[in-house]
Image (cartoon, rainbow, N blue to C red):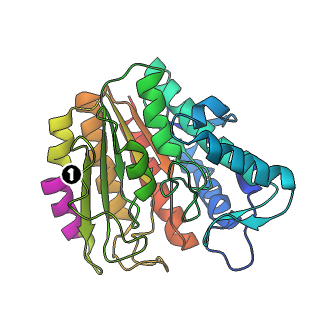
Amino acid sequence: MSTLILSHNDCLKHVEPAGHPERVKRLEKVLDVLKLSIFNDLTWKEAPLAKKEQIALCHSSDYINKIEKIYTSNTPSQIDADTYFGTGSLAAAMRAVGANILAVDSVISGEFDKVFAAVRPPGHHAENSKAMGFCIFGNVAIAAKYAIEIHGLNRVAVVDFDVHHGNGTQDLLWNEPRTLFCSMHQSPLWPGSGQKDETGGFNNIINIPVDPETDGEKIKTIFNNSILPKLESFRPELLIISAGFDAHADDPLANLNLVEEDYAWITHKLCDVAEKYCNGRLVSSLEGGYNLEALAASVAAHVNVLMERSK
């Protein structure tokens, strides 16, 4: 069984203002590396547009209408201090959600067991009624809710190893007892949330703040001692990854010291969980990562493991 990559050219039409770190070149670099000959065994499909009712699994109708109104105004704008919105942004955001929806369908049907959504904008900062931190819709949270509400799963785990706390995913899954959300992130760092006492409405949120300058060996210890036991106890039927690569030592927006091999190690550990409890089913979706070379190398390491671990 091959690993599936989901992407779409619309995700390249979410064009940034000058100097913005969440830029088109990020995804171009990711797509370029995944088209190297070592990845010839990947299967590629185009991400569909998400349906409005799928986005509404996590976002308020007022917020969705607000985004549509900004789009119809045909005027590039900032929808929060960090999040821009241009003429191509709505289609890109809907493709990002759509990729995650199709990823869930693909692993639950058994057609694939490992899927990587190479999409932008990212999603893990978007809250129920608010864009935030480069994110418009909560891509992975919507995927988790979709797996529960449409496919009838009872235990869906989301693991977020982006360097920034996944405040949006936390907000969207806070009162959903059929999910477990684990976020490992640098602290102190924007957005400032993600402390250990933020545990969700049903003890379903696990936050693991990590000190600046933490390296891969310490991250492995934290992962083994804090995240893996929670996943083992939860026994997920589906594992979803918010795959941000900005904890890399070369990333300009943060101060952790991971390298590509650390991302490969984390991916192997999560594949172990997926194989033990989820029949191998694992969905991964691109979040952050702002040094282009480090991002490409880290995605390559991550996807290489997904390929290796596909049945």
Name which residue lies at 31% across and 24% down: 154
Front position in the image: 222 or 86: 86
- Residue 41 seen by the camera: no
Is 42 on the left-hand or right-hand side of 78?
left
Front position in the image: 308 or 63: 63
Instruction: Kindly report the secondary structure that dominates the magenta region of the rendered protein.
Output: helix
Residue 132 x, y percent position in the rendering? 55, 62
Residue 207 x, y percent position in the rendering? 26, 58
Name which residue lies at 51% across and 63% down: 288
Is 40 on the left-hand or right-hand side of 115?
right
Q: Is 204 above or below relative to 81? A: above
Q: Determine crowd level at label 1: few under 14, some 14-19, many 20+ residues with C-alpha closer than 10 A.
A: many
Q: Is 51 above or below relative to 175? A: above
Q: Indicate whether residue 22 is drawn in magenta.
A: no
- Quarter containing the C terminus: top left
Residue 259 x, y percent position in the rendering? 37, 69
Name which residue lies at 68% across and 34% down: 48
Name which residue lies at 32% across and 56% down: 183
- Identify the amino acid type marked 1: Ile
Is 231 on the left-hand or right-hand side of 307?
left
Q: Which residue bears the numbered disc 1?
A: 227
Front position in the image: 308 or 75: 75
Q: Which residues are magenta?
A: 217-226
Q: Quadrant of residue 149?
A: top left
Is 140 on the left-hand or right-hand side of 182?
right
Residue 186 x, y percent position in the rendering? 33, 71
Q: Indicate whether residue 220 is drawn in magenta.
A: yes
- Residue 10 seen by the camera: yes
Residue extending farthest to the right is 74
